Amino acid sequence: MHKVIYAPESLPPRVGANYRVAKSVFLAGSIEMGAAEEWQTKAEQALADLDIFIFNPRRKDWDSSWEQKIDHPKFREQVEWELEALSLATHIIMYFDPATKSPISLLELGLYARSSKLLVVCPDGFWRKGNVDVVCEWYAITQYESLEEAYDAIRSELS
């Protein structure tokens, strides 16, 4: 069955010509501790029947007092883990929770817009939904009305 890897746990080695981990999903999107629903746990449960790797950036030991600076070792470890896991994943579910601003998720949308890996869920009410909609249309990124629809799409692609 599935294997969940949380930041900053070791990631599996790259395989194949495209240097990705076969059948893997990165759970990108809103976290903002306390503001976003904990949708990543629901995603893990929804995809539990698949033989895949799930990369979850929601760090169990996150400390909000860490300075978000390049020379802070724990912060840098988190960011580099996310960058590596994003590059390894064959699919990226990106969820924009309307209760958040999610600036890093917007950055990651830009980084991976041309990758053909994104499945985007951006409900009405997200403060930059218009920007997300235009980027998705411009780069032919499929948007889903709900996380459940995105899970179904992953399931049909990876099972």
Image (spheres, rainbow, N blue to C red):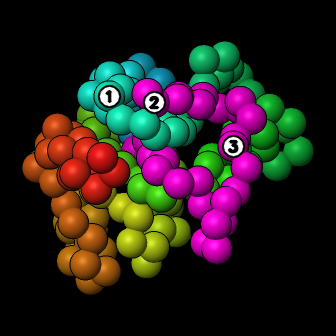
Check residue 94 for magenta coloring: no
Badge 2 vs badge 1, beta-carbon distance below 8 Å: yes
Cα separation between marks 2 and 1: 7 Å
How many numbered discs, if any?
Answer: 3
Left of 124 or right of it: where is 19? right
Cα separation between marks 1 and 3: 20 Å
- Which residue is depicted at the point 52% across and 29% down? 3
User: In the depicted view, which residue is nearer to us: 11 or 17?
Assistant: 17
Amino acid type, callout 3: Pro
| Tag 3 residue | 12
Amino acid type, callout 2: His
Residue 63 visible (yes or no): yes
Amino acid type, callout 1: Asp
Cα separation between marks 3 and 2: 13 Å
Q: Residue furthest bottom?
A: 138
Residue 120 picture quarter: bottom left
Residue 68 visible (yes or no): no
User: In the depicted view, which residue is nearer to us: 79 or 7?
Assistant: 7
- Which residue is depicted at the point 60% across and 29% down? 6
Q: Which residues are magenta?
A: 1-29
Mark 2 element type: loop
Kindly identify which numbered label has been placed on residue 49.
Answer: 1
Mark 3 element type: loop
Compared with residue 92, is residue 72 higher up or lower down, i.e. above or below? above
- Which residue is depicted at the point 80% across and 32% down? 74
Q: Earlier in the sequence, mark 2 or mark 1?
A: 2
The x and y percentages for residue 114 are 43, 78
| Tag 2 residue | 2
Q: Earlier in the sequence, mark 1 or mark 3?
A: 3
Q: State the predominant SS element of the stretch in magenta.
A: loop
Left of 102 or right of it: where is 107? right
